[in-house]
Amino acid sequence: MSFTTNVKNEISNDYNNTNANLAELTAILRNSYKKETNNLELITENSTVCKHIYTLFKELYNINIKTDYKNTKFNKNRLYHLNITNQEHILKDLGVIDDNNNYLSVPNSYLIDCEDEKRSYLKGVFLMTGSINDPKTSMYHLEFFIDYFEEANFVSSLLNEFYLNSKIIEREKGYMVYVKEAEKIGDFLRIINASRAVMYYEDIRIYRDHKNMTNRLNNCEQANLEKSMLTSLKQIEDINLIIKTIGKDALDLKIEEALNYRLKYPETSLQELSEIMTMEIGKPITKSGLNHRFRKIKEIANHIRENQVE
């Protein structure tokens, strides 16, 4: 069972007060109604969603709805159909069409006047058009596929009232409203009161974030190690050139000391080498002080190279 199905099953067992249920049913109808055909047939692959919509109509309007199902190709899934007859008064009541039977581009404001009603509206839109990736997959993604631009823009604006940073993209046969940020998707699940899905989602998200952080730290540590090894190799190259040409005796004692310890501990970082020298010599030698000595060694080596070229 997909994560989307689990979320829809969970929120389909949740009912609110009458006004919130009306807002939800408004969203369901607006995202099922085909204004070209004046047809009101609701189709879903989810039997729990089908039962939930049937219950909403029964409780709010006390009407009988014809339900049926058809098997999809190869009988993999069933499509549940809810057919509503003599529905004009319901469509008008829920702000889908006006008194002249014209489709309303946005719902009446009184239907979604408070936060609970806005949450319920988003719940209804998700039940009919929404999908959400399982957080175990490679990317976080929440989307709604909506037929009409006005409705898509309205849903996006409603999502953004809850600071979800949704965006709209046009598709061949409609519009996709989507949210990509992991935290925002978790917030959406809270908005529609999918508490079990939130716990599952956040557990997986925290685990993935921790894993990604560990990988970044490991990569950073590996990069630092490679950088340290490269620096050490260049220092040893400079030291070997100095020993071969002018010898160690020509060097300042502190420079010679750094030179000897680098040869003795060729794989250590500058910080580690300063700690070793401090412990063995008995005098504090800082990383910056040691770095200053190796800059002197580099200057001497570069000077030798310049003279060789001449």
Image (tube, helix red, strand yellow):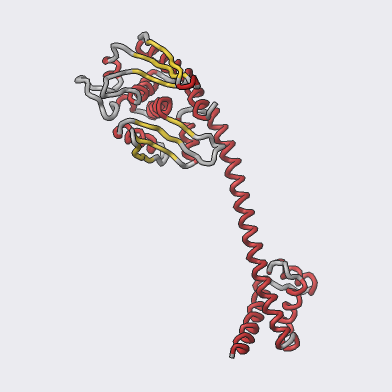
- Horizontal relation, residue 241 to residue 90: left or right: right
Based on the displayed image, in which of its 4 quarters is residue 293 positioned? bottom right
On screen, residue 29 versus residue 229, left or right, reads: left
The answer to whether residue 6 is seen in the rendering is yes
> From this viewpoint, which residue is outermost toward the left?
100
Q: Residue 51 in the image: x percent, y percent?
A: 45, 15
Front-most of residues 283 and 263: 263
Is residue 166 shown left or right of residue 201? Answer: left
- Position of residue 295 relative to residue 100, above or below, is below
Q: Using the image, determine if residue 15 lies above or below residue 119.
A: above
Q: Can residue 12 be seen in this view?
A: no
Residue at x 43%, y 25% (from the top left corner)? 127
**Residue 309 percent location from the top left of the image:** 59, 88
202 or 30: nearer the viewer:
30
Which residue is painted at 22% across and 20% down in the image?
101
Residue 286 locus on image (x, y percent) = 69, 71
Q: In which quarter of the image is the N terminus?
A: top right
Front residue of 191/265: it is 265
Q: In which quarter of the image is residue 124?
A: top left
- The residue that appears at 41% across and 40% down in the rendered structure is 163
Q: In this view, does 50 lie above or below 144?
A: above
